[in-house]
């Protein structure tokens, strides 16, 4: 059998992504614990039009919630909307029996915001992007039972 052709694609398709993702998931599921992958979308919608204007995008897998994207439009910043998004993601994580929530943020983004919301630094990548840093942050979650008894 000849070796495959190696191509750098500047415009990969969703099918290209799936062709890489699905064999990886199959391999991981056959060798490790089940990922229990579930997508996560917490949307901010315009109350008049229903248009999605921002929110939180991520997933849960391997007992952790990963926040891939979080954006609050300018008009709603400073009104605790970002904190509410994080709290909702934590609630979902507890329902899904996750250990915690993790994310990455750049030095020019919102590290302080995440720290104010209980996240701690667990790693960094210097000079990404050049002249700045990328920070990896996490927040451990209380188990569902303990969290509900604490709020009584």
Image: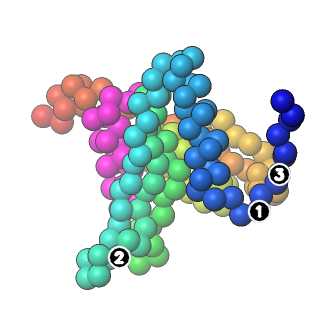
Q: How is the image coloured?
A: rainbow
Q: Which mark is residue 7?
A: 3
Viewport quadrant of the C terminus: top left
118 vs 37, nearest the viewer: 37
For marks 3 and 2 on the same chain, the one whose residue lies earlier in the sequence: 3
Q: Inspect the magenta stretch and tell me whether residue 95 lies in it.
A: yes
Q: Which dot, 2 or 1, sits closer to the camera?
A: 1
- Counting other residues with Cα less than 10 Å from the Cα at mark 1, is it few (<14), some (14-19), or many (20 or more)? few
Where is 119 relative to 97, above or below?
below
Q: Which residue is mark 1?
A: 10
Q: Which residue, given by chain and number where applicable, does mark 2 sit on? A: 51
Q: Residue at x 62, y 49 (%)?
A: 17
Q: Position of residue 4 (x, y in %)?
A: 82, 40
Q: Which residue shows up at 69% across the image and 48% down it?
A: 134
Q: Earlier in the sequence, mark 2 or mark 1?
A: 1
Q: Main secondary structure of the magenta part?
A: helix
Q: Is residue 131 above or below residue 65?
A: below
CA separation, marks 3 and 2? 37 Å
* Magenta segment boundaries in residue numbering: 80-99
Q: Position of residue 139 (x, y in %)?
A: 46, 36
At which x and y percent is residue 8?
82, 54
Q: Give x and y (percent) for residue 115.
A: 50, 46
Are the residues at dot 2 and dot 1 in contact (C-beta closer than 8 Å)?
no
Instruction: Report the quarter where the N terminus lies.
Output: top right
Whether pointer 3 and pointer 1 mark residues with C-beta atoms closer than 8 Å, the reply is no
Residue 56's image quarter?
bottom left
Q: Residue at x 35, y 76 (%)?
A: 51
Judged from the image, the secondary structure of the residue bearing numbered disc 3 is: loop
Label 3 Cα crowd, 10 Å radius (few <14 / some 14-19 / many 20+): few
Q: Does residue 121 appear to the left or right of 60 in the view shown?
A: right
């Amino acid at each position: 059998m000849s070796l495959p052709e190696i191509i750098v694609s500047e415009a990969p398709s969703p099918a290209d992504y799936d062709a890489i993702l699905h064999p990886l998931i199959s391999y991981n599921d056959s060798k490790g614990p089940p990922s229990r992958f579930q997508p996560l979308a917490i949307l901010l919608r315009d109350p008049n039009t229903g248009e999605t204007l921002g929110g939180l995008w991520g997933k849960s897998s391997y007992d952790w919630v990963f926040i891939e994207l979080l954006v609050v439009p300018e008009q709603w910043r400073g009104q605790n909307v970002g904190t509410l998004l994080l709290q909702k993601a934590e609630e979902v994580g507890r329902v899904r029996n996750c250990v915690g929530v993790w994310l990455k943020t750049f030095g020019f983004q919102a590290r302080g915001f995440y720290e104010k919301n209980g996240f701690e630094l667990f790693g960094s990548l210097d000079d990404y992007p050049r002249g700045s840093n990328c920070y990896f942050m996490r927040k451990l979650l209380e188990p569902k039972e303990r969290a509900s008894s604490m709020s009584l």
